[in-house]
Image: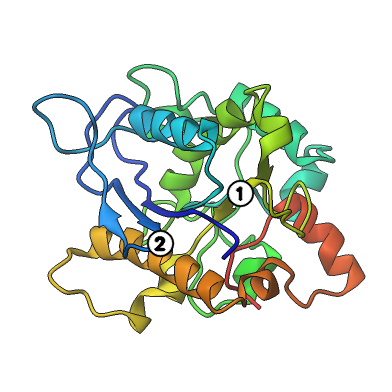
Amino acid sequence: MKFDNYIGIDYSGAKTVESRLKGLQVYEATQDEQPAKITTLAQGVKNWSRFEVAQYCKNVLESDEISIIGIDHGFSFPIDYMKRYGINSWDDFLLDFVRHWPTSEPLTRVDSVRNNNPRIGEAKELRLCEEWTATAQSVFMFDVQGSVAKSTHSGLPWLLWLREIPTFRERVLFWPFDGFDVPDDKSVIVEAYPALYKRRFCKQGRNPDEHDAWSISAWMKEADRREILDRYFNPPLMLDELEKAKLEGWILGVC
């Protein structure tokens, strides 16, 4: 198997970066063990904050083990947005986004930054990977049940935070922005979409958020065990679609 650990994170863009959120769930599987719920190390509390989840990811990626982390929020924006603002790389996108959407700042809510923000997209704009699924919604579709807009706009700054850790340049691959092929000696962070995986598994008493995170972890482990994960790392895209996906990103499991 390619990885030692398989981590599924069901994300939440509610409230502020410090808030402890019931909807923020983390599950981790190993080669030998099924996904288990991971709880925050903070004393006397049971729910994660977004800051703590970022710290947890950092700790995982700093270890000697090779891990795959799947996070349930958009990792980038549609190509029309990129063209509109003259953005030509994912790193430039993250830097530009954080300048206009400082949602990782203390006591900052997505909605407060959203008001009168000049960097906004339209709900009808979709990435190619979203067009290839039946249910994925635009990263710009706010105020709709089940949308990922808030999660995306609150989670992107933490991808930049991880991206800027100097040692991660050599040991962590941000898929597919660093390439579609995943070397055996690198950990990888991917965009996950629980709707693709969760109906394959029984809930077994887990609430919806828990089951989403569990399913991400379980599906990645099973795909690796069956030696088909590389097939999903390299979706059957035409050359022009590949170039678009290198900027827009891709959802692991969409083929």
Residue 138 circle label: none
Quadrant (top left, top right, bottom left, bottom right) of the C terminus: bottom right
Check disc 1 and report its element: helix, strand or loop. strand
Q: Amino acid at mark 1?
A: Val
Q: Position of residue 105 (x, y in %)?
A: 43, 18
Name the residue carrying label 2: 217
Q: Is residue 176 left or right of residue 108?
A: right
Q: Image quadrant of residue 224?
A: bottom right
- Residue nearest the observer in this picture, 165 or 192: 165
Q: Quadrant of residue 72?
A: bottom left
Q: Nearer the viewer, residue 250 or 16?
A: 250
What is the residue that sits farthest to the top in this orientation? 106
- Whichever of callouts 1 and 2 sits on the residue coming sooner in the sequence is 1
The residue under label 1 is: 188
Mark 2 is on which residue type?
Answer: Ser
Residue 82 horizontal side relative to residue 158, left or right: right
